[in-house]
């Protein structure tokens, strides 16, 4: 089912979301989440996480259940 929203309503929704986004960003600024120091900490955390993931690669199909969709590798047919 597809719904259509009148253009005036779309504009009102987007205006409200933008206002909410600005308010949340201001709260984050007040908490100090957008300082250069905070950005460096987040970047360092991302690098650490990426390095850990690279060191312990997991097999792509590990834990994958195909429910019989594909035959076993040892099956003849």
Image (cartoon, rainbow, N blue to C red):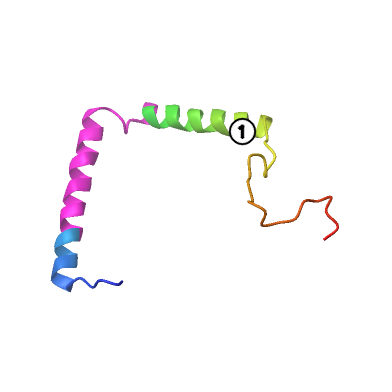
Q: Quadrant of residue 10?
A: bottom left
Q: Nearer the viewer, residue 3 or 37?
A: 3
Q: Is residue 28 magenta?
A: yes
Q: Residue 22 in the image: x percent, y percent?
A: 20, 45
> Is residue 70 depicted above or below 11 in this figure?
above
Q: Residue at x 61, y 33 (%)?
A: 53
- Tell me: 52 left or right of 34: right
Q: Secondary structure at mark 1?
A: helix
Q: Residue 24 in the image: x percent, y percent?
A: 22, 40
Q: Which residue is mark 1?
A: 53
Q: Residue at x 51, y 33 (%)?
A: 46
| Segment tinted magenta in the rendering | 14-37
Q: Quadrant of the C terminus?
A: bottom right
Q: Is residue 23 magenta?
A: yes
Q: Residue at x 32, y 33 (%)?
A: 34
Q: Residue 71 in the image: x percent, y percent?
A: 75, 55
Q: Quadrant of residue 5?
A: bottom left
Q: Quadrant of the N terminus?
A: bottom left
């Amino acid at each position: 089912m597809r719904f259509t929203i009148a253009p005036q309503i779309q504009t009102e929704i987007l205006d409200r979301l933008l206002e909410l986004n600005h308010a949340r960003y201001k709260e984050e600024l007040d908490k100090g989440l957008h300082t250069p120091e905070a950005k460096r900490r987040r970047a360092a955390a991302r690098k650490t996480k990426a390095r850990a993931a690279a060191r312990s690669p997991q097999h792509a199909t590990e834990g994958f259940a195909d429910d019989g969709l594909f035959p076993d590798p040892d099956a003849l047919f």
